[in-house]
Structure formats: C-alpha cells, structure tokens
C-alpha cells in the first residue's frame, strides 16, 4: 500500500517537473534560434506625400513683384512617389520582455515625388516640379516572437535623425498670358526627421529575411523661399515654412553577416 502511494507520488513529481520545464525549454529554444549579430537591409516602395501648405508673408526685394505684408500661402499636391532605403542593423537575442526581441538600425533613405497641382493664395495657377527627401536616422525596433518555430514575425519601431528636403516647385497664373513659370518655391533646408513603422518579417532562411513595412515620416518645420523666376530672374519674395509629412509602404530584405 505504502509502496503504491510512494510510486504514485514519484510519477506525479516527474510529470510536474516536465510540465514546469517545458515552457522554459521552449523559450530557451526560441532564444537559441535567434542570435546576436549584424545584418544589412534594403527596401524599395511607394511614398505618399501629404499636401504641403507653405505659409509666409511677402517681403519682396526691390524690383520683385509682390506686396509687402501680404500673405504668401502656397498649397501643393503630389503624385505618388518612390522611396529607397538601406540600413545596417544589430539584432539582440534577448530583450527586457521575453516576447519582444530588439533590433537597432542606422538607415539612409531617399524619396522623390512629382508635383500634381496647387494654388497660390487660393488662386488658379499651373504647377510643376518635384520634391525630394534625403534622411539619415537611427532607429529601435521590437520583433514580436512568441513561438520557437515562428515564420511570420510582426514588428514595430521608431526612428529619429536629420532630413534634407529639396523643393523645386514652379508655377504661373492660368490666365492665358504666362506660358512659363513666374514664381517658385525653392530651397533644400535640413530639419529634424522622425518616423514610426510597423511591419512583418517572413523567415526565408536562417540568415535571410523578407519583410513588408508601412511608416509615417515627418521632417519638421523648415524654411523655403518663394522666388520670382520669370525670364531667368531670381528675386526673393517671401520666406515660407512647412512640415513635410508622408506615409510609405515598402518591401525589403535583410541578410546577416
């Protein structure tokens, strides 16, 4: 009788030990499959620029058309543009939270979009030109890993850095008189850039990933010039300010090295 009771207790103890050890072993296996190390990534996709609202007050140089103190508000819309990015990153095996695995990246990106239309002070003008962004950012990401054999890994992250916005936006009144640009919004100022991103990674192999990502980017409050450019002139009319905001989607690859 006592022997049977002891045997039962022994079997129960062994089962309990395995039950408690299983999650720890699964977590250990998940961590074993993820290694610390560097990787390279490249991304290409579409960039959707928000309309620009360049806002300022006219203060024209001598001989430049315009009225001192009058508003200089230029609204500009854009076609769908393109974006390309490259980054070097470092992946950590463990994080502060067991299912969040951190990554860090240093990234360089470039995007460009053509002007689709616009208006000056609510008028009727013909617009042309383009706007491009060059950004350098440092970012922190978290991969969401809940299974040792997980093939699709969601992630999220944010970045901060500097961005150069190059505006080459031209327009002229749609009155049948002018046929070439008379004014332009120009400049290539540097500003603070931030972004937030979400995406998902597909594990193609032990050292190679494919991922899809969406991100919102903002290059904050920079100064541009409204200039009189008719007939080859180049005269200052107003200082304008604007944020450059965009939403982008892209597909990329990562490779360990």
Image (spheres, rainbow, N blue to C red):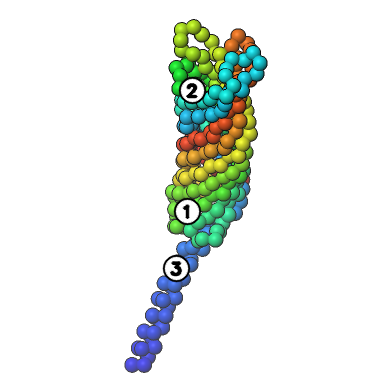
Query: Disc 1 or disc 2, which is closer to the eye?
Result: 2
- Pointer 1 with pointer 3, Cβ within 8 A: no
Q: Residue furthest top?
A: 177
Q: Position of residue 132 (x, y in %)?
A: 56, 28
Mark sitting on residue 144: 1
Q: Residues within 10 Å of mark 1 (few under 14, many from 20)?
A: some
Q: Which of the marked residues, 3 or 2, is nearer the chain's N terminus?
A: 3
User: Circle 3 is placed at which residue position?
Assistant: 22
Q: Residues within 10 Å of mark 3 (few under 14, many from 20)?
A: few
Q: Nearer the viewer, residue 78 or 68?
A: 68
Mark sitting on residue 257: none
Give the SS element for disc 2. Answer: loop
Query: Disc 3 or disc 2, which is closer to the eye?
Result: 2
Q: Residue furthest right?
A: 62
Please tell me which residue is depicted at 59% across the width and 21% down the height of the picture. Answer: 68
Q: Is residue 206 above or below residue 148?
A: above
Please tell me which residue is depicted at 46% across the width and 40% down the height of the picture. Answer: 214
Mark sitting on residue 121: 2
Q: Which of the marked residues, 1 or 3, is nearer the chain's N terminus?
A: 3
Q: Nearer the viewer, residue 24 or 126?
A: 126
From the viewer's perspective, tell me whether residue 108 is left or right of residue 150: right
From the viewer's perspective, tell me whether residue 116 is left or right of residue 88: left
Q: Which of the marked residues, 1 or 2, is nearer the chain's N terminus?
A: 2
Q: Residue furthest bottom?
A: 2
Please tell me which residue is depicted at 50% across the width and 29% down the height of the picture. Answer: 53
Q: Can the viewer see residue 147?
A: yes
Instruction: Quarter of the image for the N terminus: give it.
Output: bottom left
Q: Nearer the viewer, residue 184 or 148?
A: 184
Gap between marks 3 and 2 measured at Cα: 68 Å
Give the SS element for disc 1. Answer: strand
């Amino acid at each position: 009788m006592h022997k049977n009771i002891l045997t039962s207790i022994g079997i129960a103890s062994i089962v309990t030990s395995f039950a408690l050890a299983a999650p720890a072993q699964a977590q250990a296996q998940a961590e074993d499959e993820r290694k610390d190390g560097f990787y390279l990534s490249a991304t290409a996709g579409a960039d959707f620029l928000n309309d620009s609202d360049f806002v300022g007050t006219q203060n024209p140089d001598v001989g430049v058309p315009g009225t001192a103190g009058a508003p200089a508000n230029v609204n500009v819309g854009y076609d769908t543009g393109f974006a390309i990015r490259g980054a070097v990153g470092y992946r950590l095996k463990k994080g502060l939270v067991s299912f969040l695995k951190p990554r860090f990246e240093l990234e360089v990106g470039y995007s460009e979009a053509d002007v689709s239309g616009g208006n000056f002070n609510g008028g009727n003008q013909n617009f042309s030109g383009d706007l491009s962004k060059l950004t350098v950012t440092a970012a922190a990401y978290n991969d969401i890993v809940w299974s040792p054999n997980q093939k699709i890994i969601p992630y999220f992250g944010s970045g901060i850095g500097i961005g150069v916005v190059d505006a080459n936006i031209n327009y002229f009144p749609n009155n049948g008189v002018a046929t070439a640009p008379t004014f332009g919004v120009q400049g290539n100022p540097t500003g603070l850039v931030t972004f937030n991103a979400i995406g998902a990674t597909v594990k193609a192999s032990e050292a190679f990933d494919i991922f899809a990502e969406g991100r919102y980017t903002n290059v904050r409050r920079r100064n541009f010039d409204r200039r009189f450019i008719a007939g080859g002139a180049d005269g200052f009319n107003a200082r304008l300010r604007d944020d450059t905001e965009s939403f982008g989607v892209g597909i990329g690859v990562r490779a360990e090295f």
